[in-house]
Amino acid sequence: MNRLMTAKSLRLVIGGVLLVVALAILPLLAIDIPGVLPGPTYTPGTLQLLAFALLIAALALTYRIMFGLAGLLSFGHALFFAAGAYGLAMTLEAFGPAEWPSALVFTVAIAATLVLGFVLAATVGALALRVTGISFAMVTLAFAQAGSVLIRRNPGSATGGDEGLALDTAHVPPEFVGVVDTRNLYWLALGILVLVYLIVLWVEKSRAGHVAEAIRENELRVRVIGIRPYNVKLLVFIAASVLASVAGMGYLLLQSGAAPRIATADFTLTLLVIVVLGGAGARWGAMVGGIVYTLLDQRLTALAGSDAIAALPDILRVPLSEPLFILGTLFVLVVLFLPGGIAGLPARIATGRKQHPVEPEEAVDA
Amino acid sequence: MDTLILLVVTGLGLGALYFLVASGLSLIYGLMGVLNFAHGAFLTIAAFLGWEAGRRISDGTWTGLAISALVGILVGATVAVLTEVLIIRRLYERHIEQALVTVGISLAAVALFEGIWGTDPIYTDRPAWLTQTTDLLGARIPNDRFLLIACAVLVLGGIVLFLKRTRYGLIIRAGVENRHMVTALGIDVRRSFTLVFAIGGAAAGLGGVLASVYYGYVSAHLGSVLLIFAFIVTVIGGLGSLTGAAIASVLVAVLQQFANFYLGGTGDLVVVVLLAAVLLIRPRGLMGKAA
């Protein structure tokens, strides 16, 4: 049994490494998938889209340990992503005039943003975790809303209000600036995804991860055993949030700016859609969900502007030209008919079950 | 003094809007444990269809407004009942999935409304009296505030009477208290789920039409903004408590107005601070039952 397990996990590790290598050499190849990608894989436009998809996948992964692992239905995850993006943009601007070497400024700015993300996560988490379930969802929503309002208000012209904040490139390493270097940004995004994946894996396999899983299943039993759920939940909350702000920093560099849209409740809801679409039960589900969603969103927007849609009668044209309408409907259908999401598909096909499973299938988590 | 009165009355008017949304949310949550994100969509569709009906028949008059309100209530109730019967009922007792489905509905609905009516707010015509002001103890108060407050008080009174005086109201109250006991006594609680959705949808529908009066426009995002504050109100008031929702609506809205005026437009932040404070001191909310 034991040898079987190691053989299986060895295969998984090799498969994962091969996948990362395949993704890493993508910018050097000219693969064209019409209808899915806007152009061959070496073009900056396509790389930009792919890098964005990888970052969203990383963000979805951080949301998955919050929601899928610990069962914390947070509606405020966008706050930490935005904290990463805006935090780095603001610290870079604040250190802008400093006489230090650029590399040092860049490192210090990243460190400062991480500290900011940690403090924010600890504060919000400590408060919000005083309540559970649906109340927790609402409280996190309220905090995220406050953050969103603050960003839009533009206090002391620090956040740029509705127009967003452009990246001050004075101290950013030149490898990450400019359209020609999009492939570096793509590799950065891939690096962030791998980093987030490894940390998430570590958190999940740790003792705290197992306790978090147990809390999701039966909090009362965990209490009876003598473990305080609060501390473990706070730990998971902070880990997920800080990782989200790492993804946010990647987003800032990739988009050379931060837009207030990423702090809104709608953005968190999008994340929720991604994780559920991909399957909250599995790590790879969240990543597949993130990539599928980003590509779908981009392609549906392109489709909405196409002539084929414009020629349709109004009753078909209006809904089809709204990507979010299609995605929202798709989401409702997935929740109703496909619990387990995309990640649950192989198991469903294997067992040939058409009925709803009574319990969402957790066994698919490899 | 006049500023004070103006702020209080405006706060009461805004509180009335919050209450119309929060009452339905609170009842639905209290009875079924469903956090209904689609509630904002009920409000928005009612506001749009109410406005379309009112403007076709008689624009900018009291008749037009009355028709808008009637259409809004009907549309809100119908859409809410359809949502419950067609979608939420399929996921009975699975609370997270129910909340997720309503999230999907709200995303799709807002996108659809944007597709039909555009992304920009559409300014509406109101009866002349509503655009004027009345002198109250030296303060010049816009008349629409009085309409809002009167409507909310009527709705509150109506729901309370319904809950206290009718058989169905009794079942709903008992269901909020202990649903399993009611089921064990041989009463089909699920039938009252539809009823609660209808009531909540109707209140939200009226709220939608009144929101278009208060803001002076209809837009696809009308519901989403109000919904977030309604959530906060429901948590502060205590989930499942109608009285709590009413008190918290007024408290939140008045506080918001005062902070906006005296603390340099920080109303939204002050509300969140209030929420944090309530959660620290009393996690179950002002009038919520002990967890």
Image (spheres, rainbow, N blue to C red):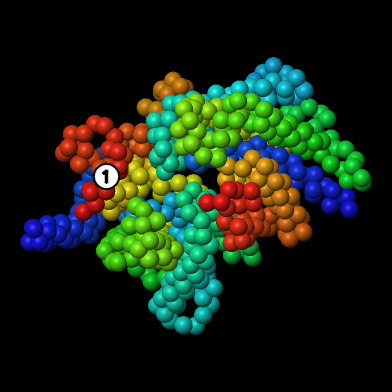
In which quarter of the view is residue A325 placed? top left
Q: In the shown orientation, is residue B278 left or right of residue A319? A: right
Looking at the image, residue A69 sits to the left or right of residue B217; the answer is left
Does residue B72 appear in the picture of this structure? no
For residue A128, say whether it is visible.
yes
* Left or right side of B188 for A355: left
The quadrant in which residue A2 appears is bottom left
Q: Is residue B163 above or below residue A104?
A: above
Quadrant housing the N terminus of chain A: bottom left
| B192 or A25: nearer the viewer | B192
Q: Nearer the viewer, residue A154 or B127?
A: B127
- Left or right of B142: which side holds A209? left
Residue at 75 percent across and 46 percent down: it is B11
The answer to whether B263 is drawn above or below residue A285 in the figure is: below
Q: Mark 1 lies on which chain?
A: A
Residue furthest out toward the front: B185
Q: Please determine whether, in this image, residue A182 is positioned above or below residue B112.
A: below
Q: Residue at x 75, y 24 (%)?
A: B60
Residue topped by disc 1: A361
Q: What residue sits 58% from the left and 48% below the top?
A: B289
Q: Which residue ends up furthest to the right in the rendered image? A: B138
- Can you give x and y, in whole percent of width and height, for residue A30 in the image? 21, 50
Question: Judging from the image, what secondary structure is the residue with disc 1 in?
Answer: loop
Nearest to the observer: residue A115 or residue A250: A115
| Residue A116 on image: x %, y % | 49, 70
Residue drawn at point x = 29 percent, y = 35 percent: A356
